[in-house]
Amino acid sequence: MSVNNTQVKHIAQLANIPVTEEESIDLADDFTETLKIVDQLKKAEVKKTEITHQVTGFKNVFREDIVKEEQSFTQEEALANAKATYKGYFVVPYILQNKDN
């Protein structure tokens, strides 16, 4: 499987990430290389490999979920750099499509 720069530009547009023509070509090559490695990993023989759920020995550390107001943004601060807002919400371009539109 390979990725071309047109696909990279489309994904970048959906993610609202500006990329130049040169960057899209480089990224396409990098994505293609990554997919080749993933294909190699898919072919790895693992039937005799024991399942491993955890390798570091670390355990989850939980903390109480406490809101610290001094570390929180106000709604106005959160929306301050938004390109567009409406009634206190971010406005983003519609990118999902279905058979009706």
Image (cartoon, grey):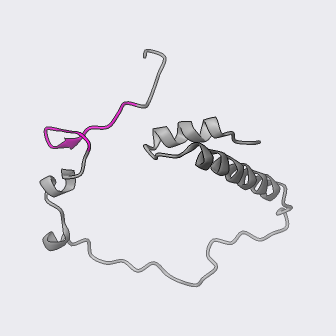
Q: Position of residue 17 (x, y in %)?
A: 46, 47
- In magenta stretch: residue 48: no
* Quarter occupied by the N terminus: top right
Classify residue 3 as left or right of residue 42: left
Provide the residue span drawn in magenta. 83-94
Q: Main secondary structure of the magenta part?
A: loop
- For the point 14% across and 70% down, the residue is 69
* Quarter occupied by the C terminus: top left
Q: How many dots with numbers?
A: 0
In the image shown, does 23 or 65 lie closer to the viewer?
A: 23
- For the point 62% across and 37% down, the residue is 7
- For the point 54% across and 36% down, the residue is 10
Q: Position of residue 21 (x, y in %)?
A: 59, 42
Q: Position of residue 38 (x, y in %)?
A: 74, 55
Which image quarter: residue 3?
top right
Q: Position of residue 72 (x, y in %)?
A: 18, 66
User: As displayed, is residue 72 above or below residue 64?
Assistant: above
- For the point 26% across and 71% down, the residue is 65
User: As displayed, is residue 97 above or below residue 101?
Assistant: below
